[in-house]
Image (cartoon, helix red, strand yellow):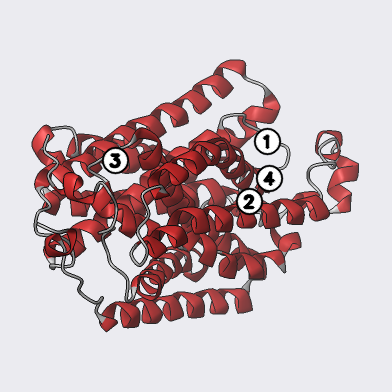
Amino acid sequence: MSNTELYTKKPLPSKLLIFGAVVTLIGAAMSGIAFAGDVQRASFGLIMALMLLISVGFGSLFLIALEYLVGADWSVPFRRITEIVAATSIISILVAIPLLLNLHEVFTWLRPELLQADKYVAKKAPYLNETFFLVRVIIAFLIMAAFYYIFSIRSFKQDLNPTEGFRKTSAKFAALFMPVFAITISVIAMDWMMSLNPKWFSTIYGVYYFAGSVLAALAVVTFIAITLGENGYLSKKLSNDHYYNFGALMFAFTNFWAYIAFSQFLLIWYANIPDETLWFMDRTQGEWMILSLILIFVKFGIPYFALLTRPSKGNPFRLRIIAAWIFFAHVYDMYWNVGPEYSKLAGLKGPVYGLAELAAPIITIGLIAVVFYLVGKGKNLMPVNDAKFKKSLDFHL
C-alpha cells in the first residue's frame, strides 16, 4: 500500500478561519478597550498573551526537534500538525509590537529614579537596559524564525520533492537547536516575566517556563490531532496507541512542571534570602494565597489523576478534555506569574479580573486557529513522503 493510499488529503474547513478571525477580533477589541482605559494594565495583559503564544509556538519547535533526536516513530503522523502550530512563535511578534511601544509602562527598571534608589537593581543595569533588551528580543525572534524555517518550511517542501537525506539533516539541526533553545527560552522568560520584578531572581525560572511551555504545546497539538483524526482529516490507520503517547507525555511534563515549581519554591524558602523570597511573598498574601493554592490543583493535581491510569492515556475523548484543561491551566499559570506584579505596581492589594486579563487567552486561541488554517491550507496534514511514515502508522504499544 502506497503512502498516498494511507492518507487522503482533505482541505481544512473555512469555518476554522472564520472562527479564528472572529475570536481574534473579539480579543483585540477587548485589549483595545483596555488600552483606552488603562495602558499599563492592558500592557500586562498583552505580556500574558505574548508568553502564551511563545509557549505554544516555541514549545512545538522543541517537540519537533525532540522527535528527530530520539528517532521516534509514533509521532511522525502528527509532526505536520506540530510544524503548523509552531508558526504561532512567528506570529507572536504581532503581540510584541504594542508592548515594545509601551515598555516604560511595565518595566520599572527603565525608570531612572528606581536605579538611583535601589543599588541592587542598579547593578543589573548592564543587562536591564532598553537597548540590550531590544537586541535580545530581536535575536530571540530571529532564532525562532530560523528554526521554524529549518524544521517546518523544509518539511513542507518534502511533500513536493522527497529527499532521503532530509531526516538526517534535520536531526543534525535538532542537536544544535536544543542548547540554543534552552538559552533562548530562559532569556525570554527572564526578560518578559522575571524582570517585571527587577530585584527578584531565580536561576531555575527559565526551566519553570520551559516545562510549562512544552506542556502547553503538547496540549494544543493533542487537542488538534484528536479533533482532526475524529473528523477524517488524518489517516484511518491511527489507533489509540498513537494517542496514548500524547497522554504519557502530558503526564510526564505535568510531573516535571510540578517538580521544577516545587524545587524553585523549596530552595528559595530554605535559603530565606530577602531578594529571593519577596516574589513568593507577593503570591502568598491575601487573595493571591488562595490563587496560589488553587494553581497546585489546577495545573498539577487534576491533570495528574486524570492521566494516572493507562486506559486514561489512550482514551481520545478523555485526552481532548484534559488537553483543553492543561492549556487553560497554563493560562492560569501565566496570570499567576504576571498578575501580582501589576497589582503591586498599581498599589492594589489583590488580583484584578477584566478585559485586559481575559483578552490574553482569547487572542491566543484566535491566532492559533487563524495560523493553523492559513499555514495548513492546501498542505498535507501528514508527512506522507517521510521515509518513516508507513512504519509509523503501524505503531503499536
- Kindly tell me whether residue 348 is visible in this rendering: no
The numbered disc on residue 192 is 2
Q: Are marks 4 and 1 in contact (CB under 8 Å)?
A: no
Q: Nearer the viewer, mark 1 or mark 2?
A: 2
Q: Residue 153 vs residue 9: left or right? A: right
Where is mark 3, residue-wise? 250
Which is nearer the N-term, disc 3 or disc 1?
A: 1
Q: Say the numbered circle drawn on residue 195.
A: 4
* Left or right, 310 with reference to 38: left
Going from N to C along the chain, the mark reached first, 3 or 4, is: 4
Is label 2 in a helix, a strand or a loop?
Answer: helix
Instruction: Report crowding for label 2: few under 14, some 14 to 19, many 20 or more residues within 10 A (C-alpha).
Output: some
Contact between labelled residues 2 and 1, with CB atoms less than 8 Å apart = no
Pinpoint residue 24: horizontal percent, then vertical percent.
43, 76
Foreground mark, 3 or 1, reads 3
- The residue that appears at 29% across and 77% down in the rendered structure is 16
* Marks 4 and 2 in Cβ contact (< 8 Å): yes
Task: Find numbered disc 1 in the image and state the secondary structure of the residue it sits on.
Answer: loop
Q: Earlier in the sequence, mark 1 or mark 2?
A: 2
